[in-house]
Image (spheres, rainbow, N blue to C red):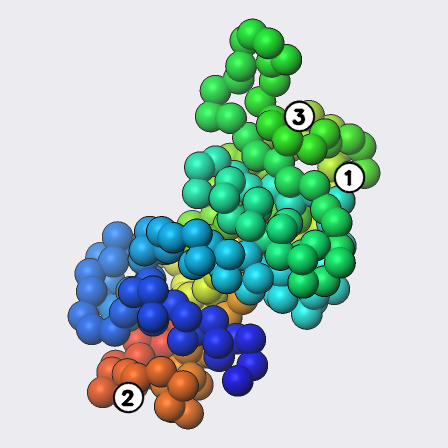
Amino acid sequence: MTYKEEFIKFMTECGVLKFGEFTLKSGRKAPYFINTGNYKTGKQLCRLGEYYAACMQEHGLKANVLFGPAYKGIPLAAAASIALWKNHGVEVGYAYDRKEVKDHGEGGMIVGSELKDSTKVVLIEDVMTSGKALREVYPKLKSVADVDVTGMIITVDRQEKGLQSDKSAVQEVKTEFGVDVYSIVTVSDIIAAIESGVVDGKAYLPQMLEYRAQYGV
C-alpha cells in the first residue's frame, strides 16, 4: 500500500474516519465524519507524525521550523519534527503560539524555536474547515518576524465548497494568503480506497459519490 492508503486505513482503525450519516457543523448531511479527537495514544501520535513527515517529503517542502497552532497543532508539530529526523534525517525546529501573551519571565507569544526574518515555516494542523486557524496565526507570525510560510499540512482535504462561496477552505487560503495547503489525503483518495477495498465502506460509496457531486470542488 502507498502511505496514503496506509493512512486511510490507520484513520479507520483509530476511529477517526467513520462512515454513516452525520450532521456537520455546516448543517450538511454527510456520509462520513472525521474526528481527530480520537488520536489519543503515544503510538497513534508517533504514527501520525510519520505521515506528516512523509507528506512533506513527497511535496519537497522545506522548513526551518514546524509551527503548530495552539492547542491541537502543538503535539502534531512536535511529532512531525521527530519523524522527520528519525525517518528522513532532516532536523527542524518546532514552535507554537500562546493563546495569551506571557507578561513575565521571557514573555512573548511564541514558544520553541526562534522565528527570524526569512525563517522558513511550515504550519501543521489536523483539518481545515474554514481556514480560521491560519487567519488567526498568520498575523501572529508576521508580527514576530517576516517569516516565509512555505506551506501548511493538514490530514484530510474535504475538497468541499464553503457555505459562502464555491471555493474550498484550501482554495480560499491560497487566494487570501498565497499559502499552499497540502493534505496527507483527500476525500478523492478515501473514495478510491473504498473502491479498491483498502477499507470497508462500499455500502456508503453511492452516498459518498453523491455528496461529492453536490458539494465537491
Residue 202 is tagged as: 2
* Residue extending farthest bottom: 196
The kind of residue on which mark 2 rests is Lys
Instruction: State whether residue 186 is above or below residue 64.
Output: below
| Residue at the extreme top of the image, as rendered | 104
Separation of residues labelled 3 and 1 (CA atoms):
13 Å
* Other residues around mark 3 within 10 Å, as few (<14) / some (14–19) / many (≥20): few
Q: Which residue is mark 3?
A: 143
- Whether residue 178 appears in this view of the structure is no
As measured in the structure, the alpha-carbon distance from the residue carrying label 3 to the one carrying label 2 is 48 Å
Residue 57: give x, y in percent of width and height: 70, 65
Name the residue: 63% across, 13% down. Answer: 106
Earlier-in-chain disc, 1 versus 2: 1
Q: Mark 3 or mark 2: which comes first in sequence?
A: 3
Task: Report helix, strand or loop for mark 2.
Answer: helix
Residue marked by disc 1: 119
Quarter holding residue 138: top right
Residue 106 visible in the snapshot: yes
Image coordinates of residue 53 in percent, x first then y, are 63, 60
Above or below for 11 versus 144: below
Mark 1, other Cα within 10 Å: few <14 / some 14–19 / many ≥20: some
Q: Tell me the crowding category of disc 2: few under 14, some 14 to 19, or many 20 or more residues within 10 angstroms, Cα based.
A: some
